[in-house]
Image (cartoon, rainbow, N blue to C red):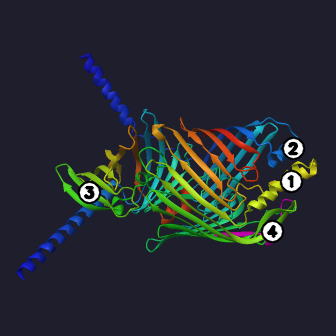
């Protein structure tokens, strides 16, 4: 009898617990919300000591073959949002040591809902134009993207943005949207004023046409190259998306080294990208993109640049070294400075029932010189709001190739990310 | 002549009865949709992914829907997902990640949250928008409908749907074009949400493709609401939080 009573009690309690599972607390709406993440990163790097870039970066220093770096990055975001008005903040702080810290204001802007169809935004805001994942030929107002980490937060543009959007119930066009951006000149006098004729304008006209996203984009400037382009993205099947971008530019600077000296040519040309995102029956997502840029350097032009760095490193002259470092930083500091690249990324969430674990592999292949970056990020999220990332990266190619001439051969990154 | 007339009459009867059956089925499917959700609403939902080892991952969303095929969602928790939004207009779907700063297209078979629910399940629009009724049966417990996707961009090629006599959905089996069972959705815990809406408050799913996994969606505070069309646009995805009261 006691056993029966105990069993009944257990049944009642378990039923009650089960029933409680179906109710939940709804997060309250706070007028001001703070959020962000703390990244702690430890990297081990295998140096490529015969690379001119290494020899310049660590000029006259005798270091071991294996280097390490320990870094904290703190992203703090604040959002104040009412029905019609919002103020948004994104900051980034970097800490290597007490002597090496950095603070960046990534975004600080306010937006106001002007009408049912239009918004006005003022301040510093990160834009991200284009449909490509790793590259964006039409990303005229985007920060420079790191194809190895395309989803990292980055610094925005000090600007004024007007948005207009209109939806339609019938017809082939379901939605149109217009973005107009006014960008005051970054060349300021006494860090305060600039000449009004050097104000830049960027515009984007979007259509949702026959279930395809289509953008027409234009960048107008007196000081910078004028650019115009188009992009598109469409789901072809339930598991396949295709996208593309095409941009034409006039007066785009192309940085070269001629006769061991820096030279700038202003060229007219085009840049484009075609890509796809495919989910297969194994739940593996594949992103494949081809990117071309007329303003990139050729194999021979890259050799000239590499020779210039090598000559500076072997000159024994401090001012030549510092000049070469400065030219490298200003003119050749992109992640993709040559003409043709292929990007491939495959990621497989929770393979073989290994829960919370997502392995991936990506490669950025330089079609012009045959070099490549190959990364194998392994993500593990055992606890809510915590992620551990283990990422070996290999840089291959001959000594005159873009990736084969980098200062590191391989690197191993370990990230711990805490969200709040 | 008489024989020809007989054939014509027979053919007309077959055509007419087929059309009548199809209309009945499609009308029933529309009523099932209406009983499942108001045409335009806002709601909070909790999604629980239960892993084979019994551990759980939980997400809370704020959802707004307008008409038969417009739905937008804002992730409220956990902190790692907070601020992400998704939008669906018919068969078009996008994901907005605040750090990335732009909406990217996603496909219906992908799953942003992992687990058994895919994007099409989480952002389900009216079934009558995506499917035609290909067969209908009635027994003492209610209705059984065979549904066929209207085109190849719909997540599942065929559905087998069970509804009670009062036309409230109880179960759906989702099949691929080859006839393979992809997953089963069960609707339970009937709840009165007010404003005349009485519907299942819990949707549970499991799949032979994800052995040992189970995902549960719990509905709360489902309220009819009116939203302007521009809420369901890519430009508005970063501003969804402003709709919450």
Query: Residue A343, position in %: x, y?
Result: 61, 55
Quick check: is B139 in the magenta stretch?
Answer: no
Measure how far apart labels 4 and 3 are at the Cα level: 66 Å
Which is more N-terminal, label 2 or label 4?
A: 2
Q: Is residue A412 left or right of residue B191?
A: right
Q: Nearer the viewer, residue B147 or B219?
A: B147
Quick check: is A197 in the magenta stretch?
Answer: yes
Secondary structure state at the residue bearing disc 2: loop
Q: Is residue A294 left or right of residue A83?
A: right
Up-down: is A417 above or below A149?
A: above
Secondary structure state at the residue bearing disc 4: strand
The residue at which mark 1 appears reads as A324
Residue A209: give its label: none
The residue at which mark 3 appears reads as B146
Indicate the chain on which mark 2 is placed.
A
Q: Nearer the viewer, residue B225 or A92?
A: A92
The residue at which mark 2 appears reads as A59
Give a yes or no on whether discs 4 and 2 share a subunit.
yes
Badge 2 local density, few (<14 within 10 Å), some, or many (20+)? some
């Amino acid at each position: 009898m006691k056993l029966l009573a105990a069993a009944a009690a257990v049944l009642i309690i378990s039923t009650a617990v089960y029933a409680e599972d179906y109710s939940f607390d709804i997060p309250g709406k706070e007028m001001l919300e703070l959020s962000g993440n703390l990244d702690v990163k430890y990297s081990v790097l295998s140096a490529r000591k015969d690379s001119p870039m290494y020899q310049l970066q660590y000029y006259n220093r005798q270091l071991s073959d294996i280097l390490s770096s320990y870094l904290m990055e703190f992203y703090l975001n604040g959002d104040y949002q009412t029905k019609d008005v919002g103020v948004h903040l994104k900051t980034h702080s970097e800490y290597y040591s007490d002597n090496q810290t950095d603070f960046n204001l990534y975004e600080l802007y306010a937006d106001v809902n002007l009408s049912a169809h239009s918004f006005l935004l003022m301040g510093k805001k990160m834009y991200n134009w284009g449909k490509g994942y790793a590259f964006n030929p039409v990303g005229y107002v985007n920060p420079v993207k790191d194809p190895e980490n395309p989803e990292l937060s980055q610094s925005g543009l000090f600007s004024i943005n007007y948005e207009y959007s209109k939806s339609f119930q019938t017809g082939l066009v379901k939605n149109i949207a217009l973005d107009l951006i006014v960008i005051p000149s970054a060349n300021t006098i006494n860090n305060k004023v600039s000449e009004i004729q050097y104000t830049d304008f960027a515009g984007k006209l979007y259509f949702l046409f026959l279930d395809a996203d289509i953008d027409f984009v234009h960048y107008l400037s007196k000081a910078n190259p004028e650019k115009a382009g188009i992009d598109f993205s469409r789901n072809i099947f339930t598991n396949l998306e295709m996208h593309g971008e095409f941009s034409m530019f006039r007066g785009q600077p192309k940085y070269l080294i001629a006769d061991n000296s820096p030279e700038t040519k202003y060229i007219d040309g085009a840049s484009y990208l075609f890509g796809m995102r495919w989910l297969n029956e194994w739940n593996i997502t594949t992103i494949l993109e081809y990117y071309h840029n007329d303003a990139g350097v050729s194999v021979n032009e890259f050799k000239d640049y590499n020779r210039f760095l090598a000559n500076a490193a072997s000159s024994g002259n401090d001012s030549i070294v510092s000049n070469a470092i400065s030219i490298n930083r200003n003119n050749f500091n992109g992640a993709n400075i040559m003409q043709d690249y292929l990007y491939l990324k495959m990621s497989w969430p929770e393979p073989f029932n290994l829960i919370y674990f997502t392995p991936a592999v990506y490669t950025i292949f330089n079609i012009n010189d045959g070099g490549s970056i190959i990364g194998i990020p392994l993500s593990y999220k055992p606890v809510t709001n915590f992620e551990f990332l283990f990422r070996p990266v290999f840089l291959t190619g001959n000594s005159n190739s873009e990736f084969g001439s980098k200062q590191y051969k391989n690197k191993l990154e370990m990230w711990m990310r805490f969200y709040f | 002549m008489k024989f020809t007339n007989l054939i014509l009459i027979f053919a007309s009867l077959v055509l007419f009865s087929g059309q009548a059956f199809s209309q009945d089925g499609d009308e029933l499917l529309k009523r099932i949709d209406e009983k499942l959700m108001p045409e335009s609403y806002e709601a909070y939902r909790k999604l629980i992914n239960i892993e084979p080892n019994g551990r759980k991952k939980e997400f809370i969303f704020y959802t707004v829907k307008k008409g038969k095929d417009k739905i937008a969602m804002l992730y409220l928790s956990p902190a790692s997902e907070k601020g992400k939004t998704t939008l669906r207009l018919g068969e078009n779907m996008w994901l907005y990640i605040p750090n990335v700063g732009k909406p990217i297209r996603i496909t219906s078979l992908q799953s942003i949250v992992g687990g058994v629910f895919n994007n099409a399940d989480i952002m389900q629009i009216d079934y009558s928008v995506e499917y035609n009724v290909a067969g209908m049966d009635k027994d003492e417990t209610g209705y059984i409908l065979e549904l066929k996707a209207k085109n190849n961009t719909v997540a599942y090629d065929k559905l087998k749907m069970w509804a009670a006599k009062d036309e409230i959905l109880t179960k759906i089996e989702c099949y691929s074009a080859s006839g393979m069972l992809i997953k089963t959705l069960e609707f339970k815990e009937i709840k009165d949400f007010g404003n005349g809406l009485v519907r299942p408050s819990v949707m549970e799913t499991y799949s032979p493709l994800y052995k040992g996994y189970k995902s549960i969606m719990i509905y709360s505070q489902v309220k009819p609401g009116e939203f302007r069309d521009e809420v369901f646009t890519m430009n508005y995805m970063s501003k969804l939080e402003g709709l919450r009261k």
